[in-house]
Amino acid sequence: MNRRNFLKVVGAGSAVTAAALAGCNNAASGGSDDVPKGKMTYRTNPKTGEKVSLLGFGFMRLPQKPGKSGGEDADDKVIDQDAVNELVDYAMAHGVTYYDTSPRYCKGQSEHALGIALRKYPRSKYVIATKMSNFDEADQPYEKSVEMYHNSMKELHTDYLDYYLLHAIGDFDGFKARFIDNGILDFLVAERKAGRIKNLGWSFHGTQDFFDYMLTLPIKWDFVQIQLNYHDWDHRTEEVNADYLYGELSKRKIPAVIMEPLLGGALSKLNHSVLTMLKRADAEATPASWAFRFAGSLPDVLTVLSGMTYMEHLKDNIKTYSPLKPLTEAEKAMLEKAADMIDNEPTINCTGCHYCMPCPFGLDIPGIFKHYNSCLTEGNYPDNPDSPDYKKERRAFLIGYDRTVPRLRQADHCVSCHTCEPKCPQHIEIPAKMHEIDSFVEALKRNNA
């Protein structure tokens, strides 16, 4: 299913979806202070019949504050629980019911923070998704994986889990070691039968062959979490495109939970040409809202996850889905053109998931990629010494690099140990990219004319 077929899928489903879902009659309102209440779009879980908010709150990236040392170093920061509570309170008040976390997110503190934020609400008012994040096969035998499962319920103050995922699977050997050889998949299926897991699924990062294999297993999957956005619909270069993943799930009537609707924030920070095109279509709409409308317009999507660290992001996303305004044919064609334009950018496909971290040699890998990509999309990329803006762009890049990433954590400290590479869900050749960036930075330092 390519992007043109997406037009048919959504065209057929949008009218039905819009009519069937409560409150899907009007566009989201405009200003930052008029976030609608009671207008959230919901999707129905076909297994349980429960309503789930189309916007899901992802707890991978949370507000932070300085730790015990009081410094600004990222390694010393801790979760700002008061800020998390404020975000969750606002989300609950505006109809967000789906909350996604993991034992590994935020240095192991995400579940704890979510449990504190939600515990004052009746358990029936929200659903929790968490994961079996037993990535280190050698250190996660059956007993430790079961311990992780029970600890999740302890941290989240619950005796059952609404959505439970086999976390970040994508290859046969890893899946076999983490879930088959140690008996953990059998354990989780038994827990679902006992009612302590309401819905069992998996999050996918891998090859098409492995995705197809998972769908042939003699297990009834209740949902699958996939990476989907208007660029990855049929433009993924390293892995299988999102149109295929969604199409296979839709054929089997398996609800899709969407991650990376903004491609790690890349679709919210667009270059001038793409941004101008979107603004001409709707001067009030944010770049993020277009991406969320794309994902939400697919009728078999259960919920779309967003890591909303700041209140402004939460408000914007709530407005986009309160209620959802399905994409028109002209808008779908425009986003197809936007994806083509984005492909011409030399950005690095990092989503900031931090799975590559920690680096044994202290590099801030996501921070380095984030600064590099930001300079590209914001026009501060000094690649032409003959440009009249070269000196200004060069200075902005180098000063911004030192401010964003401490010098001891910059790309020049990469020794190509390749520890990070197998952990990257986007399959980025991280050491190679680090050396490219380091060479670029060194050239800028030398060219100070």
Image (cartoon, rainbow, N blue to C red):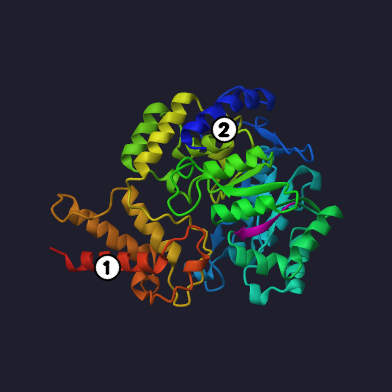
Q: Is residue 87 visible?
A: no
* Label 1: element kind: helix
> What segment is highlighted magenta in the picture?
163-169
Residue plotted at (22% across, 55% down):
383
Q: Is residue 318 left or right of residue 409?
A: right
* x and y, in percent, of residue 147 in the image: 76, 70
The answer to whether 169 is drawn above or below residue 220 in the figure is below
* x and y, in percent, of residue 47 in the image: 78, 40
| Residue 214 image-quadrant placement | bottom right
Residue plotted at (80% across, 44% down):
124
Report the Cα–Cα distance between label 2 and label 1. Answer: 43 Å
Residue plotted at (32% across, 53% down):
375
Q: Residues within 10 Å of mark 1 (few under 14, many from 20)?
A: some
The answer to whether 305 is drawn above or below residue 326 in the figure is below
* Label 2: element kind: loop
Verify whether residue 424 appears in magenta.
no
Q: Is residue 242 left or right of residue 287?
A: right
Q: Is residue 83 left or right of residue 181?
A: left
Q: Is residue 282 visible?
A: yes
Q: Which residue is more in the foreground, 120 or 377? A: 377
Q: Determine whether label 2 and label 1 are within 8 Å by CB.
A: no
The answer to whether 73 is drawn above or below residue 56 in the figure is below
- Residue type at mark 2: give it: Ser
| Residue 296 image-quadrant placement | top right
Q: Nearer the N terminus, badge 2 or badge 1?
A: 2
* x and y, in percent, of residue 328 in the image: 50, 25
> The C terminus appears in which quarter of the rendering?
bottom left
* x and y, in percent, of residue 18 in the image: 63, 25
Label drawn at residue 297: 2
Label drawn at residue 5: none
User: Residue tagged by mark 1?
Assistant: 439
